[in-house]
Image (cartoon, rainbow, N blue to C red):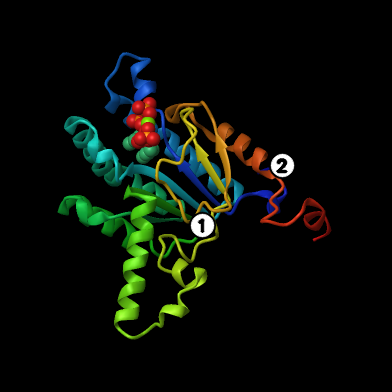
Amino acid sequence: MPGADAAQVPRHIAIVMDGNGRWAKARFRPRSFGHNAGRKAVRDVVEGCLRQGVEALTLFAFSSENWQRPQDEVSALMELFLRALDKEVDELHAQGVRLRFVGDLDAFGEELRERMRAAMTRTAGNAKLQLNIAVNYGGRWDIVQAARQAARAVAGGQLAIDEIDEARFGQWISLAGLPPLDLFIRTGGDVRISNFLLWQAAYAELYFTDTLWPDFDQACLRRAIEDFARRERRFGRTGEQVAQA
Ligand code: IPE
Ligand code: IPE
Ligand code: MG
């Protein structure tokens, strides 16, 4: 970003892409029209992250609770994911984006899973931006799947119970190995986490905007990053300690 202090650009941003349904409703169109319109916002935000040197971007595309939506909306979303995978991966690959899907992928049909795997394999060598798409993801699921892995390691004799600490446990949580989550954005006006990255958000800066996801663009992202740059992150210390560091 021209003029921005690189130290104040978040290394890892996560976004709850919310408000597609209301955006469509305002235009007297079906909810799926809003989901489809959200694709442009995804492209724009990826572009913005590449320009500003953000290392990792994690987007909430489908929560473990979203299966409860009407069947036709769920089907339309699955169709959209398939189409988006067909259409967008070439461009992302050309941009140097490494794509990864996080969540309980077993719930998806074989065709979709296969395409997700292919996209991950194809872009695995890219390093400009790590783009994580959270699908059938839930923060509680994430903690439970990590707990299962810990239990397995203990049962298998590779780990003693007392060796489980935050660092060790954190290695099993999704997105381990990426920079810690700095900035958590939610569009659409609701002020809640909706079971997104619970563990990872422990010390993220939270940013809520009324802008509906299909209207979110690079300028909106820049505003969020500027807001982030003005925050004082104390991590439990005092403001004076932070100023001296
Ligand atoms: C977010 O937009 C997209 C998904 C959950 C897949 P919504 O569909 O939740 O939009 P609103 O909140 O109803 O406007
Ligand atoms: C969260 O949005 C999930 C995604 C954006 C994918 P929702 O719109 O489903 O969240 P709630 O249920 O209203 O909190
Ligand atoms: Mg919503």
Residue 73's spot in the image, x, y percent? 22, 31
Q: Quarter of the image containing the C terminus?
A: bottom right
Q: Image check: 62 left or right of 76? A: right
As drawn, the label of residue 128 is 1
Is residue 95 visible to the viewer in this orientation of the structure?
Answer: yes
> Which residue is tagged 2?
230
The secondary element bearing badge 1 is classed as loop
In-front residue for pair 100/227: 227
Of badges 1 and 2, nearer the viewer stands 2
Q: Mark 1 or mark 2, which has the lower sequence index?
A: 1
Residue found at x 36% / y 66%: 147
Residue 187's spot in the image, x, y percent? 48, 32
Residue found at x 33% / y 73%: 151
Residue found at x 46% / y 79%: 162
Residue 65's spot in the image, x, y percent? 29, 41
In-front residue for pair 194/211: 194
Local crowd size for mark 2, using a 10 Å CA cut-off: few (<14), some (14–19), many (≥20): few
Tell me if residue 159 comes above or below residue 196 in the rendering.
below
Q: Residue furthest front?
A: 162
Corner quadrant of residue 26: top left
Residue type for callout 1: Lys
Q: Image check: 173 left or right of 50? A: left
Is residue 39 visible to the viewer in this orientation of the structure?
Answer: no
Tell me if residue 160 comes above or below residue 202 in the rendering.
below
